[in-house]
Image (cartoon, grey):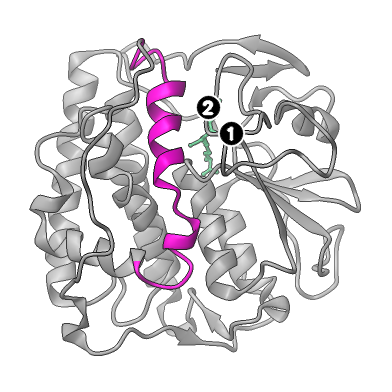
Amino acid sequence: MGLLVDGEWKKDWYAPDDAGRFVRPKTRFRDQVSANGQGRFPVEPGRYHLYVSTACPWASRTLIIRAVKGLEEAVGVTVVDPRMGEDGWSFEGYPGSDQDRLHGARYLREIYQRADPHYTGRVTVPVLWDTRERTIVNNESREVLRMLDTEFHALAREPVTLWPEALRERVDETITALYEPVNNGVYRAGFAKSQDAYEKACRELFTALEGWEQVLSRQRYLCGDVLTEADVCLYTTLVRFDLVYYAHFKCNLSRLQDFPNLWNYLLDLYQTRGFAETTDLEHIKVHYYWSQDAVNPTRIVPLGPRVDLRAPHDRDRWGPRRLAPLPVPASGRS
Ligand SMILES: N[C@@H](CCC(=O)N[C@@H](CS)C(=O)NCC(=O)O)C(=O)O
């Protein structure tokens, strides 16, 4: 693990704050692709490219929306090696990952150095790359998810949106509510460097999960009866929960399987088109257990747990699964 400082690679683990808490650094590239043909980054088929890890919950958000909307021909993808060592993310041929066919790079940091030779910050996935301007448009998953859903919709094969007009505010509030206790909460527990910081993060996580368990006892999805971006954001944490976060990050007050609604909801989402195809359970396990040697110094990847995500679920009790249809307005930025 490491980061770039003024364009130079430095080997370094995350520095905790004074109380031993994990603090996630802010992402730097925050430009927008626009549907209306204006600005530096107009939408065009084949112009933009995603660098992702199928192990990473943030990058997986972008893979799911790309698959659900049928954007595979319009937006290319390169999958990094799930093992992130001292040199950061790389293209080293682990099964299920790619070589960098755009630049022939060995490490993802070379892509950041191309975008800004003096970049200072972490080298993270996802990255939305512009092949025309040869730069990074955006590396913040929530924003890339939204752009693929709204600004790219003219290029989508499937006429659906996960940000339906009537639910926009609710979806945005839900994504925000999930972030700190749940999506980032598992990391705050797992990367804590003090007992207090760990316990606080772990308790907040389980309190939040209990709340969502209640919500999902009343309705099929987080924001009502249609699938939204908020479900994508929760899914990428839930699918890693029993597999990795329970043991590796010590999020073990209970298993996800002990929450009947959350567990059945996870099975439902996994079995929805676009989800299982973009979820690589082996990459997930290898990434966390092998890469985070400050948490797991032996780098041994456990064999279990046995989890069957193809098992029947009870979520059809609300009737057949529904996706919200287009149209969405041309520029749907939040
Ligand atoms: N806020 C970013 C976080 C992305 C992120 O932290 N990705 C992790 C992988 S799960 C990463 O690339 N970490 C490498 C590092 O921090 O050095 C987002 O949501 O896109």
Residue 160 sits above or below residue 230 on the image: below
Residue that label 2 marks: 83
Q: Residue drawn at (23%, 36%), measured in percent from left and top?
A: 304
Q: Secondary structure at mark 1?
A: loop
Q: Secondary structure at mark 2?
A: loop
Query: Is residue 294 or residue 208 the one in the foreground?
Result: 294
Residue 229: image quadrant is bottom left
Q: Which residues are magenta?
A: 271-297
Query: Is residue 52 or residue 206 the one in the foreground?
Result: 52
Q: Residue furthest right?
A: 132
Quick check: is 283 in the magenta stretch? Answer: yes
Residue 207 sits above or below residue 324 on the image: above
Residue 327 left/right relative to 137: left
Residue 93: image quadrant is top right
Query: Can you tell which mark lies on residue 94?
Result: 1
Q: Residue drawn at (68%, 32%), measured in percent from left and top?
A: 91
Query: Where is residue 78 shown, x and y percent of the image?
Result: 69, 47
Residue 220 sits above or below residue 263 on the image: below
N-terminal label among 2 and 1 = 2
Which quarter of the rendered picture does the C terminus lie within?
A: bottom right
Query: Is residue 101 or residue 30 the one in the foreground?
Result: 101
Residue 283 left/right relative to 6: left
Quick check: is 296 in the magenta stretch? Answer: yes
Q: Is mark 2 within 8 Å of ligand 1?
A: no
Query: Where is residue 241 shown, x and y percent of the image?
Result: 26, 43
Q: Is residue 334 visible?
A: no
C-alpha separation, residue under disc 2 versus residue under disc 1 = 8 Å
Do the residues under discs 2 and 1 have CB atoms within 8 angstroms? yes
Query: Where is residue 330 shown, x and y percent of the image?
Result: 69, 80
Mark 2 or mark 1: which is in front?
1
Residue type at mark 2: give it. Answer: Arg
